[in-house]
Image (cartoon, grey):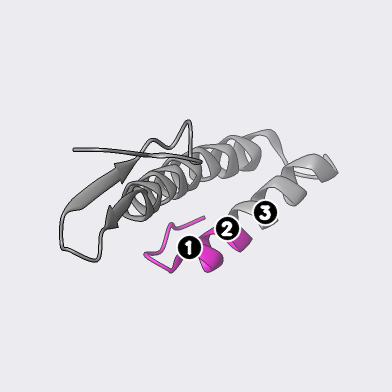
Amino acid sequence: MAIKKNNFEEQLNELQEIVNKLESGNVPLEDALSEFQAGVKLSRELEKKLNDAEQTVAKLVDKDGSEKTLDPQNASAPEEE
């Protein structure tokens, strides 16, 4: 399966289709390996997009313009910089 540069939701749907196909057990071994490789690649791309989005969301700007960052592991309290 060819990996296309789609938006996050389209890629996630494509990954879900691959998972469903592999879970069905009705895929020849060679095709299953190819699908699995495509799924791993998609999974890595999606993880990178999620990490990038998390870093973007983690940055907060105060009303006075000073930047604060939010620890993604402890999202309840911003850290002073």
- Residues tagged 1 and 2 counted as in contact (Cβ below 8 A): yes
Query: x, y percentage for residue 28?
Result: 72, 40
The image position of residue 4, as x and y in percent, is 41, 64
Circles 2 and 3 in contact, beta carbons < 8 Å: yes
Q: Quadrant of residue 48?
A: top left
Q: Tag 2: residue type?
A: Leu
Name the residue that disc number 2 marks: 12
**Element under disc 3:** helix
Graded by Cα atoms within 10 Å as few (under 14), some (14 to 19) or many (20 or more), the crowding at tag 1 reads some
**Residue 31 position (above or below residue 49):** above
Q: In 3D space, how far apart are the residues under numbered discs 2 and 3 (Cα atoms)?
A: 6 Å
Q: Residue at x 67, y 54 (%)?
A: 16
- Magenta run includes residue 22: no
Question: Considering depth in this image, is 41 or 28 the residue closer to the camera?
Answer: 41
- Magenta segment boundaries in residue numbering: 1-14
Q: Which residue is mark 3?
A: 16
- Tag 3: amino acid: Gln
Would you say 17 lies left or right of 36 here? right
Mark 3 or 1, nearer chain start:
1
What quarter of the picture does the C terminus occupy?
top left
The residue drawn where x is 40% and y is 48% is 54
- Point 51% across, 60% down: residue: 11
Residue 8 image label: 1
